Structures are given as structure tokens and as C-alpha cells.
Amino acid sequence: MLAKLFVVLLSYLLLVFLAARIFEISSTWLKAGCLASQLLSPFTLSVRKLKAILEERGVSYTGLVEKKELAELVEACGTLTGAESCSISAESSGDNKEESNELQFTGASHFFEEVEDTKAGTWLVDVIPEGHSSLLRRKQWLALRRKIVRFGIRIGTFNCGNDPRLCIKYGWKEPSLAISMPQGNQPKGNVILKTYDSRPSVELVFRWISKELSLKIETFDRVEEFSETFKAKIEENPVYVLLFTTLPEPPLYLASLSVQFTGRVRFGHVRAFDWTREKHILKNYSIDKFPSLMIFTPEGNLTYGHRKGEWVRYHNLELFLKTLHPDVNDVFVTVFLMMNMSCFMALFIINGGILKRFIHFVWLLIFYNTSLIILCLPVLAMLQLPCLTPLLDFALKYSRYAMTSDAAAIMRNYLFFALQHKWFLYGGYLFYGMLIWWVQRRIRWYSGYENEHDSATSITEWLTQDLHSLTNVVQTFPYLGHSRIDYSLLGLEDGFEPLMRRLAVPELWLHPIIPTEYLNSLPVWKFRHSQVNHCCDDKQENCTSKCNSCCKESVKPPGMLVAQDCSICLEDFNSGCMLLGLPCGHCYHQKCIEEWLCGGNSSCRYCCPVCRWPAFKQKPLALRENLTRNQAQETNV
């Protein structure tokens, strides 16, 4: 079932990919000039856009007023594409919107759970001791939050009045700001806290954050210094990110990524103020343009920023590195999302009403999510075995080959666009599911396999059919099958109370003997010779008149298959004898079938002697119609 749902999800993603490609080459994008491969010169942009680009890259421009100085600073950060410029223009209208992702810590345990247990991540906490106010004013705090939240830094506030022991432990006696980061270069190292309690200035705090996070970036003052130690470093780390620039300090987007990818990717900053003299050295590493953001892997070098979606920004580079060197958590989250989105499509593929679809959907979610969690534990234990290390290295190697291709860059570009417009993606998935449901229904209608759920025209009819099916399931348990409930449209509300009363019965396993109360609800009538099913199977010209006469005389319940003799005692039915019908449609002498059903505790004794359908379980209408049709065909033959 999951494989079928997964194929439907992949077909939807393929349609989204094709739609994105068509949209990309449409006249709207061409007129807007937002081609991803078009490189722009910073000197052609306005001062406002230059400042917005510097804020996106985490570079301080305090004291710079001239457009030329701002353009040179943007150029020193890396390449600039037309799509990135258009994206910044579209986002500039929302700069004044206040973010609402600030977390209020309730105590020391909450602080440890969110901050210290987050091994790979950065927190900025506003510490407010008892009897004091915050270090920054509210306006300054909002401005600082808008500057750093785009770099994956999470924001929180801790009031020492909630738990003074934590403030005593870290010596927080004055209003201050605390930043957390993992210690060392291990992926799960201990978390360290550093405190800022100096001058309350947004710019000073921003520089302090950049300086603290940049400690994990290895700095080279000369290209020759980098060239001498490059071979040893690339052997230690499979992925190495290096920024060749004239900036004295690395930008904040690079510093924040160095903290997030601790133990997975190493970062470096090469300062070359006169790169023309060292141009011959840079050519050895396929660096033709300066400044450049280079990705070094054992398989080769890659210049980041020259393909679609490769913007010199935090989120774009984060997505690139996650696909280039995925973590176990990244793989788990991807599988988890794909599996749950596939299960969601069961709401539209499964036949039945709303209640049946929803119950089946919840069952799929519980079953597959539980199975995923159970399977992850032994898989993680196996991956830590030393004998599997060559296999993992082999998989990561060819994964890097695939993720550095042009096709992977296009897929990342569309994925990034989808992550920015999640409601558009989910809305399209919902519409796609409704389209599949409609197509399935039309195919069944054209093929002549339309069931009773397809003929329902209202929610009330769907609920009636679902409750009717649920009653049949409940009647499978012998103790619950005392009597049938009439789920008609008028008696829908009356059916809930008996059903809930049945489901609330405990100790279902304490009644191994099936009670015979269900016999009271089976139909009983007097037999007449006109009730035999083949009385109308004569010549074509007399069929209509004979059928009409049979229907007038017959008083048998609808759907019953009346034969000429009883299959138990093998005697013919006499006019006036009492017959008892089973849910499957077969009927027998009342005395014979009662003795058959009450004659023992074997499971076979509670079934129809002919078709073995349980006598206490109602048969679906579609199966009964097929049985009637097959019997009529056998009679004609």
C-alpha cells in the first residue's frame, strides 16, 4: 500500500517539476529579468538594494555612505545573480514585519532542554536578572532580532525570577546577552555559553556575535599559507568550504554555517588583498575569478554561485551542504515527510465514505510512523559498526558526485522555491489528490464497477454507509452481534448510542461461545413455488409477464436466492413451509438451519453451508449482487 502511495507522491513531484520548468521559461520571468544564470554587477544597483544584500549576507556596512563603497563591499562577498537581486526586492517589502519566533524560557530545565541539549545550533538569549530590565531596549532588541534571525540563530529570553539557580550558576548578575555554540569540532560536543554585558548597541552586539561564531572558521592571511596545508586538510575533511575574498573578517552567514555543520564540513577564510600576484596559485585550484566561494571535495573543486539557485546566502548554502553531506537526522526527516505525505494520499485513493477514509488514514499514519521509529534504532546501531565504514564512504562519495551536478542544482532551486511557498505546495497536493479521486470515480463509472459509495451524493449518506460498514465489523465479534442497527437517513442519530454502547463492552475475549441471539434478526417467511429464482428463466417472449406475476405473489425478503430444495436435508421445499434466510442470500428450512447453526462450537458451524459466509455478519451489497449474477448465468446455461 505504501509503495502505491509513494508512486502517487513521486508523480505529483514530477508534475510540480514540469510546471516549474514551464513557469521558469515563460514570458513573465523573461520580462522581469530574473534569470538565475545572469550575473549582475553591484555597481548597477541602488543603495537601498546594496544594503539589503549586505544584510542578507551578514556583512556590516556601518560608516559607509557612498554607493561605490557599498558596491565594492558586495562584490567582495561573492557573486551576485539576477534571481537573487529580484528575490531581495520582493522580500524588502516585509522588512518591517515583526518575527514571532522568540522563546520564553520558563525555568532551568526548559533552558537546558532547548539550549544545552541542542548540540549543533546557536542560541542568543536575553538574560534579565531580578530587579533589572533588559540590556537592549525593545526597539533595539527587535532590530537585532531582524538582523540575525535570517542566519538560523534562535532567539530566547530568560528571566532570572523564574529560576534564580541558573543565573547563580553562570554568574548572571547584570543584564546581558548569552550566546551558545558547540565546543570544539566534534558534531556532538559540549555546549559553551559566552556572555556580552558591555555597551547596549545593536551594531556592537552584531559584531560580537560575528566574532564569536567565526572562531570555528580557519583564517589564512596569505594564499601560500593555504596552499601549503591544503592537502592535509582535505584528507581530514571530505567537504571544505573556503571563501577567497578581501574582507578582513568572514561574513555572518559563513560563521553561522560553521557552527551548524560542526564535525561535518570545515570552513575557511582566505584573505588576499592583492590577488593578481597570486593568480598563478589560484589557477591550480580552478579559481578564475576573485572573490570566490569554493567547495573542495575529494572528487574535485566547485565554484559556488554560478548555477541556478546558488545564491550567496545562508539558507541556499545550507540546503546545498545538507544535500552534499547529509546527516542521519536529515535523512530521517526526509523519509518521515515523504512517508506522511504518501499516507495523506490514502484519503483520496481508498474506497469508502469520509469516516472510513479517515480511520484508514489514521491507521496508516500510526502503523508506518511506528514502524519507522522501530526500524531506525537497529539501523543506526548497524551504521556505527566499523565494518560498514567503507560502505558509507562509498555511498557518500557517489552522493557527492550526484549532488554537484547541474541537474541537482536545478532540483535544489525548485526545492528552495517550494520551501518558501509551502502553502502553494500543500494546496497543489490537495488538489492533486481530489483530481485522482475524481478520475478513479469516473473510470469505475465508465467500466460499470461503480459501488454504493460512488452513488452517495451527500455527507449524510457517506456517514450512513460508513456506520453501516462499521456495524458489520463490530458484528464480526460474536458478543457484539446481538442485533442489527438500522442506519437509515432518518435514524442516523439513533444509531450512535447503540454503537458506542457496543464498543464500550469489556472482556470481549471472555466469551468464546458464539451466542445465538443473532438468529432473531434473520428473515423468516413462508415458501411459495413462485419464489424460485429460475421461474422467470424461460423463453425471452414470456419472461416479462412471468416476472411480473412472481413479484406480485412473492413475499420473500429482497436479495434472497431461493432454490427448489434445502441444501442441508436435501428435501424439496413444500408450499407453506417456513424458510430462514442468511446474510449471504441463501435460504434453508428454518428447523434445519437452526440446528446447523446451534449444533456445535466449531467456527464452521456458524457459517452458511454453501458459501461459508458467517451467519452473524452482513454481506456487502456488491458481493451479493455478484453472487446473484453468477447464479443467474449458471441457470441460463
Image (tube, rainbow, N blue to C red):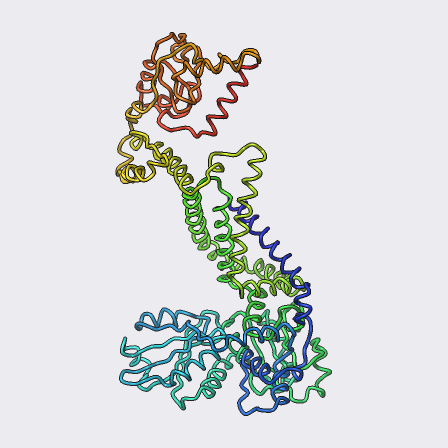
Please, is residue 461 above or below residue 381 in the view?
above
Residue 397: where, in percent of width, then height?
62, 62
Query: Residue 360 sits in which quadrant?
Result: top left
Residue 313: where, in percent of width, then height?
57, 75
Please, is residue 78 above or below residue 368 in the view?
below
Q: Residue at x 35, y 9 (%)?
A: 576
Q: Quadrant of the C terminus?
A: top right
Residue 425 visible? The answer is yes
Give 295 or 472, whichever is nearer the viewer: 472
Residue 44: where, in percent of width, then height?
67, 82
Please, is residue 559 above or below residue 379 in the view?
above
Give 477 or 452, whichever is nearer the viewer: 452
Residue 182 visible? The answer is no
Query: Residue 188 sits in which quadrant?
Result: bottom left
- The reply, left or right, for residue 77 in relation to residue 94 is right
Give 421 or 134, whichever is nearer the viewer: 421
Residue 256: where, in percent of width, then height?
51, 76
- The reply, left or right, for residue 290 in relation to residue 371 is right
Count every numbered label the image shows and give the total: 0
Please, is residue 249 above or below residue 10 in the view?
below
Q: Residue at x 54, y 81 (%)?
A: 55
